[in-house]
Image (cartoon, coloured by chain):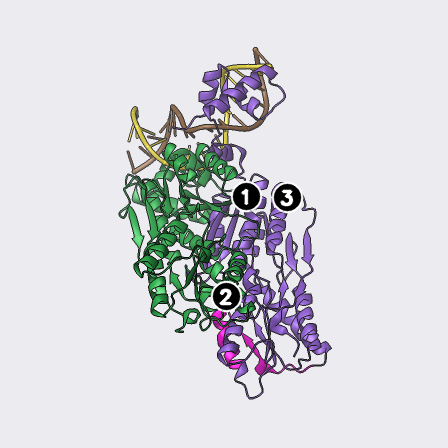
Chain colours: A purple, B green, C yellow, D brown
Amino acid sequence: MAVTIKDVAERVGRSITTVSRALNDYDDVNEKTRQRIKQVAAEMGYQPSSIAQQLRKRRTDTLGFIMPTYGPRFSDPFFSEFLAGVGNTAAKSGFDLLVATRPPGEEELDAYIRNIQSRRVDGFIIVRTRRNDPRITLLQEHNYPFAVFGRTEKHNNFPLVDENSELGMQLVVNHLVEQGHKRIGYIAAPEDLMFAQYRWQGFKTTLAAHKLPLNPAWVMRGDLTQRSGKRLTHQLLSLPEPPTAIVASNDLMAIGALTAAQELGLTVGRDVAITGFDDIPWSENTHPPLTTVRQPIYQIGALVTEMLISTIHGETPAKGRVLLQPSLIVRASSAPR
Amino acid sequence: MAVTIKDVAERVGRSITTVSRALNDYDDVNEKTRQRIKQVAAEMGYQPSSIAQQLRKRRTDTLGFIMPTYGPRFSDPFFSEFLAGVGNTAAKSGFDLLVATRPPGEEELDAYIRNIQSRRVDGFIIVRTRRNDPRITLLQEHNYPFAVFGRTEKHNNFPLVDENSELGMQLVVNHLVEQGHKRIGYIAAPEDLMFAQYRWQGFKTTLAAHKLPLNPAWVMRGDLTQRSGKRLTHQLLSLPEPPTAIVASNDLMAIGALTAAQELGLTVGRDVAITGFDDIPWSENTHPPLTTVRQPIYQIGALVTEMLISTIHGETPAKGRVLLQPSLIVRASSAPR
DNA sequence: TTGAAAGCGCTAACAA
DNA sequence: TTGTTAGCGCTTTCAA
């Protein structure tokens, strides 16, 4: 059995109370006593039971992160990088990270409710916001701490980090127009995702600013996977008057689009331009390398986590609402015509 | 404040004990009483404090998964898929999942020690075994439950799942030989990783079986990243007598190799064959699509988790040691010459 | 500077 | 069938 504070107390010949105070650096402990206690505790390999501490202190020093996933074979690279940002930052502040995966929907919300009611974690990290995000509604109703990557359609009166996707799309479209493209197609993201809105807005607005046509036949909606990017691109490029450039709203779909274009015998960059969004690590290793918009996922994860921890500590986060400016990464998939 | 068992007890006019027993379906509770208690508990939104339960029951129903990661921008797709397998399986058995990321080394081992001593989790999932894995040594010394994906150099007297990499490499080499290749290069994985050993063994042995030469100049060692695959392939293909086929010991390095070959103006599949290992999701979307060996990562994650949970429950896992048979996925990167 | 005692919320042995 | 009691391991009053 593991060594408890009682074992240490008996060994030192002091009370449990004194041991606790010594170890927690209270200043009403005799310096010699403290040193001896610390030494013995170390020798015995004493480590306080985190469970007992949690019960007593009424906090868990644990963050909850429930990843919204669809199929089992889920491998959106977004998550591993974001997770690293969250995990490392949490660890730095002495927080643990409780992770779960749930498909968006009832089960997902149940998981939140159970974790709230059983006080399993001190707060939640939310990602991939939806237009009317039930997770946020729930958390606000319960007055439970959380911090978010992404905005929602409503108030947004909570700690959040988001990236300025409208600007990102503006950069993409400007770039394509400079390359001489006039017929630009779009592969949108699922409508309920908030970032789909912003990216689409940015696309539409910038197109209009250039007085370019927005042919409804050139607009498709995918599900963020390569598979759908590939399928939709096949459709786009088989139109009687196909677009000369295809803007995908994430990298995964853009990668699928590359495949589709090549299957049709086209040379991407020369015959058709394709762009992505996110700058996932392998977008620089696609063939040709992918023009895309950079989002610093790791840093965003870190930032959101800092905000959550501030909130848990009862502080108003130093930066309550951060909007990051993305940058365009031009690669060969949108080479000059 | 959250509702406790005491609140429910007072509301029903029964003792705390009775409420506890009713809710946990003990059979020594009057059926009417039980029904009433359950109903009231539901109405009040009562959920037992998991912390208090953990303290009392002396188990946490939580699994620990410390991911060995190098740089911060870590995005090995292996992990997200494995994590999904672990997470979903754990959830199915009522276990939570505590996740952390640590670079292999002291800090990593410290994290294990602290989690063991503070009894934060009931057991650990270990991945990416090293030849003499200090994590396993530690866990065995402390007699702490764990289950492993991968073998080690020594006894392997613990619950493990691994895939038969030797066979996998044999399939790869046989395939390349059938395509007429005689000069086959190899990009190895970091030497301390156990799977590097098996894959290398499989490669070497099969080459010898075909009485083909193993030119030391054709063997390179990478760090699993695309970047290193690319760099080493540049070197391999710049040799006076370059190999006509390059076997990479994982997909990420193979993808880097594709890029390098193309930068040198070669057509992969025709001028040079390149193969990977893992079948990560986007190996089918590379250009050309990558010939590789399939590992069912998600299922492996699920299987390891089941083993760990059995071990925690004090059972000997039904299958204590599983060796999965991999299969070769032939794609265009190794088309006939 | 130290210790006794209470109590966080729950389960389980024991008694009634 | 129900309730009383002890106690999991810790922190924190309060009193000495």
* Residue linked to disc 1: A122
User: As shown in the figure, which amino acid type bears the numbered disc 3?
Assistant: Ser
- Please state which amino acid type lies under the numbered disc 2: Leu
In this rendering, the answer to whether B167 lies above or below A266 is above
Q: CA distance from mark 1 to mark 3?
A: 11 Å
Task: Name the quadrant of the C terminus of chain B.
Answer: bottom left
Mark before the other along the chain sequence, 1 or 3: 1
Q: What is the CA distance from the residue labelled 2 to the residue labelled 3?
A: 45 Å
Image location of residue A150, percent across then percent down: 61, 59
Give the foreground label among 2 and 1. 2
Q: Is residue B127 left or right of residue B318?
A: right
Q: Nearer the viewer, mark 2 or mark 3?
A: 2
Would you identify the image quadrant in which residue A190 lies?
bottom right
Q: Which quadrant of the figure has residue B210?
A: bottom left
Q: Have a look at marks 2 and 3 and say if they share a chain.
A: no
Task: Return the chain for callout 3.
Answer: A
Query: What's the magenta region?
Result: A212-236
Label disc, if present, on residue B258 of the rendered structure: 2
- Between the C-alphas of marks 2 and 1, the distance is 46 Å
Is any atom of residue B6 visible in this view?
no
Q: Residue furthest front?
A: B240
Q: Secondary structure at mark 3?
A: helix
